[in-house]
Image: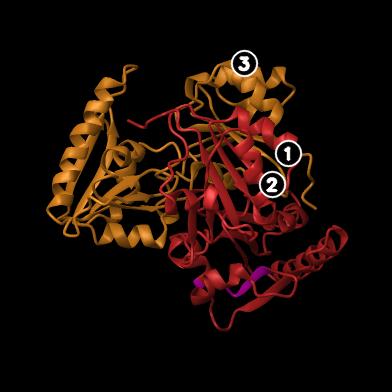
Chain colours: A red, B orange
Amino acid sequence: MSAQRDAKSGTLFGVGLGPGDPDLITRRAARLIEGARVICYPSLAGGDSFARAIAADLIPGDAEEIRIDVPMTPARAPAQAAYDAGADRISTALSAGQDVICLCEGDPFFYGSFMYLFARLKDRFAVEIVPGVTSLTACAAVSATPLTARNEVMTVLPGPLPDADLRRHLRAADTLVLMKVGRHLPRLRALLESEGLTGTYIERATLGAEVVLPLANAPETAPYFSMILVTKGADPWL
Amino acid sequence: MSAQRDAKSGTLFGVGLGPGDPDLITRRAARLIEGARVICYPSLAGGDSFARAIAADLIPGDAEEIRIDVPMTPARAPAQAAYDAGADRISTALSAGQDVICLCEGDPFFYGSFMYLFARLKDRFAVEIVPGVTSLTACAAVSATPLTARNEVMTVLPGPLPDADLRRHLRAADTLVLMKVGRHLPRLRALLESEGLTGTYIERATLGAEVVLPLANAPETAPYFSMILVTKGADPWL
């Protein structure tokens, strides 16, 4: 991806792991992880790494592990410093000729933290992205909600957006996917109701203890990894 | 999914195969196909089945194969008749207690023809959906185009939509995914240019002979399975 790449350097792999069920890892991702010498993954605010947990059974016991602990602060600088430090460690391994397998929840390029590493390393090293199953279609699957057919339009909306922005998109598309619902659930539910829309609430899709409920019956407090699907259902799919 | 289900009936599996590279099949999908007694797949207008081709190495030699040949006509009735006939054959196998593995390009619920079978069978039989990697993130991967970060909004737009609808969405979202580009490429390119937007053109993502080009350099004629990604790039992902 750059003229400055060194042929002796390793390749950085951004590997999508899917939404959480290890069975939804692709065959290519599984093979890369099983053969890894150096793996890398994010963890949030000193907690466990969800990405590492998804892939745990595949990680060789003797692989070097680069853990990037991302602080959860409103300010960006502390997270940026964590990605800087992580990119430095990855860079050292790549420069020594080792491939580095970065474990990514879902898909690396769909709201994934891998993008921050990609931005820091793509001009110096070969990068390969292995796409993964997103939470989007996982939520559609577990809730038996077909997303889009024919010429329907789908918009993906992060829940933290202001009401006015959300309202505009809610009116414009046929299918709406509200991500990062978390503490915004009561506000989002009121907003959808005010637009005459109903939806399906999903949390922990494919993780075993998943919750699928009509939005009206959703709990008052939702985890960060929760989603609302709204399909206007103009098309009977027949 | 319905009170009318018979405990002795088989389960209908809608199995996402990913965008084309057999290595992007999930482990769960691979296992289901390897163990299949009855498989089902669509083919278009008498041609080969792309879904069957993706999974070919996994299909047991002695599996029963239900092929649904979907005519490509502007009228809906001939396609509906094909899905009716396919659903009847699937229904016979399910009622006899056999599971049926439906092979789906990409993800079953993301612009997938499986929805037409799902609509016809979901009230009578148990259905399980195995989500797959979509062409969306596959195109992002092969073109090294991060799609969305933080609170960015993404809209998926079928290329056949009228200019006025497309233009409204092009202005509203941060990331645009134009699907089903095909013969609409010249019109879509002109529309994007008139909005001051550039994009990346991708065809046959993950299929080996893939094409990734700046939109300005895209060919005049595109296959049906082609895509344009537009990221407005407000966020430097740092």
- A40 magenta-colored: yes
- Are the residues under marks 1 and 3 on the same chain? no
Q: Nearer the viewer, mark 2 or mark 3?
A: 2
Q: Secondary structure at mark 3?
A: helix
Answer with left or right where residue A25 lies relative to residue B237. Answer: left
Crowding around mark 3 (Cα neighbors within 10 Å: few <14, some 14 to 19, many 20+) is few
Q: Percent from the top left, x then y, of residue B219? A: 55, 24
Q: Quadrant of residue B82?
A: top left
Quadrant occupied by the C terminus of chain A: top left
Q: Are marks 2 and 3 in contact (CB under 8 Å)?
A: no
Residue drawn at (73%, 59%), measured in percent from left and top?
A117
Dot 3 amino acid type:
Ala
Q: Nearer the viewer, mark 1 or mark 3?
A: 1
Question: Which chain does the residue under circle 2 lie in?
Answer: A
Q: Percent from the top left, x then y, of residue A186? A: 66, 50
* Closer to the camera in the image, A70 or B211: A70
Dot 1 amino acid type:
Asp
User: Is residue A87 in view?
Assistant: yes
Q: Is residue A30 above or below residue A118?
A: below
Q: Which residues are magenta?
A: A34-42
Q: Earlier in the sequence, mark 2 or mark 1?
A: 1
On residue A163, which mark appears? 1
Dot 2 amino acid type:
Arg
> Which residue lies under the disc numbered 2?
A187
Q: Quadrant of residue B202?
A: top right
Q: Secondary structure at mark 1?
A: helix
